[in-house]
Image (cartoon, grey):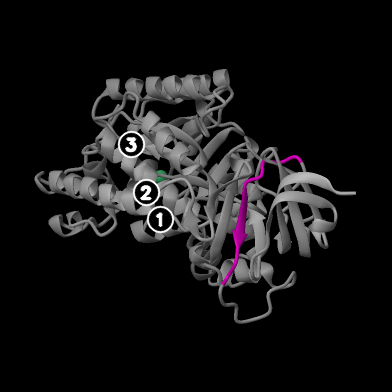
């Protein structure tokens, strides 16, 4: 007897990321109505009559990757002439002032839309099915998140989006950002027609007052969402907090009741052990962005220590390189260099940080992050054209971290729908997007170049 399903991915190596981390050497995944209805060993066609049977060469099936932290607008700077227009920044504060804030102050709604379209295309093509985005656009606050939502829905990706609340230019802009987050949360949760939902996000503790932090947590609690901010990416965060509040940033946050299991602390590069213990005490989640830490030269976060303390750490890209394989590879390598100890990271943990642990960081692990019956059919199918050593259940984690790249991704399903198939975007015309995007980006770069770079760092001094 055969049961009907919509899609059957057959004859593949399946990396389930379930509790026992089962890897099925030759098996199938059956999908119906957007959900995984079966995962098993052997030939799925003996059990299921499928509208579509997928079988690819050297097929490896993994849970759709989850990016716990990005800024989709960040990709607009790739190759920008702005870099030769300015004196190169020598530290993190200058990096924000000269590069990121020069960009975000110039962002229009059209730039936000096109960056989200490009960014979600880049994530989708390389196997990521869920993202968490923080948008900084101080001159386009109201309704800005609608443009992230529109773009991601067009590509077919799921995600969380929040406006990155800051008061670096005025106290009022913080409240405007908070209002945008609340508006977007109300508009999206409970709306079955959007794949993007609102969350509450803040730039960093050194650009907002306590009141913004307190209200952010109150609203996140009220609406039941996660909330996030950058924590101790650079030393400015630490020194600002010690100078103004007599406490380190994590201590300040604890003193006002800001820490909780629903907080995603991004980066946590400069934290000392006492602060890590506070994060652990409140079960705060951590977003690790190794390639961003490298390009910004801010240092290496103590991720192996966090893991040994039992903190949950997920992998993000911070708006830099969207390919999850590059980010996994970097997370795998950077701690070995920093600690001069090759034992401190292993491939299984790295893949966990991009799948099931990332889902835990975002509070969505009951729905996604592993291939298990009842979960959303968010699935990435990898079909490498060349593999130099055997590809099987013994070697798969090694290949995921050391061998594969985004171009090995053959297909991507979100809620059972193909958004990438046969290595091509399904829902958007990539040539049209590129033509349009390059024009928009050139205009943005022209606007930036017409400005005088600001060399004096400005941020909130409450
Ligand atoms: Zn960031």
Q: Earlier in the sequence, mark 3 or mark 2?
A: 2
> Where does the image place residue 14, in percent across and percent down from the top left?
72, 60
Instruction: Determine crowd level at label 1: few under 14, some 14-19, many 20+ residues with C-alpha closer than 10 A.
Output: some
> Where does the image place residue 222, in percent across and percent down from the top left?
56, 18
* Cα distance between the residues tagged 3 and 2: 17 Å
Residue under label 2: 118
- The answer to whether residue 24 is visible is no
Ligand 1 is within 8 Å of the C-beta of the residue at disc 1: yes
- Is residue 225 found inside the magenta-colored segment of the image? no
* For the residues bearing labels 3 and 2, Cβ distance under 8 angstroms: no
- The answer to whether residue 223 is visible is yes
Residue under label 1: 292
Q: Is residue 455 above or below residue 127?
A: above
* For the residues bearing labels 3 and 1, Cβ distance under 8 angstroms: no
* Cα distance between the residues tagged 3 and 1: 17 Å
Q: Is residue 251 above or below residue 313?
A: above
Q: Earlier in the sequence, mark 2 or mark 1?
A: 2
Magenta span of residues: 374-384
Q: Look at the numbered disc 2 and give the secondary structure of its residue.
A: helix
Q: Image quadrant for the C terminus?
A: top left
Residue under label 3: 136
> Where does the image place residue 116, in percent across and percent down from the top left?
38, 42
Q: Is residue 125 above or below residue 399?
A: above
């Amino acid at each position: 007897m055969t049961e009907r399903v919509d899609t059957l991915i057959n004859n593949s190596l399946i990396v389930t990321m379930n509790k026992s981390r089962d890897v099925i050497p030759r098996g199938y995944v059956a999908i119906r109505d957007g959900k995984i209805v079966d995962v098993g060993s052997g030939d799925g066609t003996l059990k299921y009559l499928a509208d579509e049977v997928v079988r690819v060469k050297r097929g490896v099936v993994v849970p759709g990757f989850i990016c716990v932290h990005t800024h989709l607008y960040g990709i607009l700077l790739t190759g920008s002439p702005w870099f030769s227009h300015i004196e190169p920044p020598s530290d993190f504060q200058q990096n924000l002032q000269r590069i990121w804030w020069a960009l975000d102050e110039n962002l229009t709604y059209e730039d936000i839309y096109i960056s989200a379209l490009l960014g979600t295309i880049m994530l989708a093509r390389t196997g990521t099915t869920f993202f968490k985005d923080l948008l900084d656009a101080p001159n386009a606050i109201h309704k800005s998140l609608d443009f992230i939502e529109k773009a991601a829905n067009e590509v077919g990706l799921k995600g969380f989006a929040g406006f990155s609340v800051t008061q670096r230019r005025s106290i009022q802009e913080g409240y405007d950002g908070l209002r945008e987050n609340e508006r977007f949360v109300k508009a999206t949760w409970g709306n079955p027609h959007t794949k993007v939902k609102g969350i509450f996000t803040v730039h960093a503790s050194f650009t907002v007052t306590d009141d913004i932090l307190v209200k952010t947590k109150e609203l996140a609690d009220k609406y039941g969402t996660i909330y996030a901010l950058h924590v101790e990416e650079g030393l400015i965060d630490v020194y600002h907090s010690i100078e103004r509040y007599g406490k380190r940033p994590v201590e300040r946050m604890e003193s006002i009741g800001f820490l909780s299991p629903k907080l995603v602390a991004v980066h946590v590069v400069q934290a000392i052990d006492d602060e890590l213990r506070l994060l652990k005490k409140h079960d705060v989640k951590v977003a690790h962005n190794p390639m961003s830490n490298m390009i910004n030269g801010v240092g290496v976060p103590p991720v192996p220590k966090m893991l040994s303390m039992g903190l949950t750490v997920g992998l993000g890209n911070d708006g830099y390189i969207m390919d999850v394989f590059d980010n996994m590879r970097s997370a795998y390598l950077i701690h070995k260099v920093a600690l001069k100890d090759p034992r401190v990271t292993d491939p299984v943990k790295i893949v966990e940080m991009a799948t099931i642990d990332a889902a835990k960081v975002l509070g969505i692990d009951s729905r996604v992050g592993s291939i298990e019956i009842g979960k959303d059919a968010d699935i990435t199918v990898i079909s490498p054209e060349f593999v130099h050593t055997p590809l099987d259940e013994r070697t798969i984690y090694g290949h995921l971290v050391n061998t594969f790249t985004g171009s090995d991704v053959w297909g991507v399903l979100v809620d059972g729908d193909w958004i990438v198939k046969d290595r091509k975007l399904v829902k958007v015309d990539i040539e049209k997007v590129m033509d349009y995007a390059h024009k928009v980006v050139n205009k943005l770069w022209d606007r930036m170049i017409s400005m005088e770079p600001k060399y004096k760092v400005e941020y909130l001094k409450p």
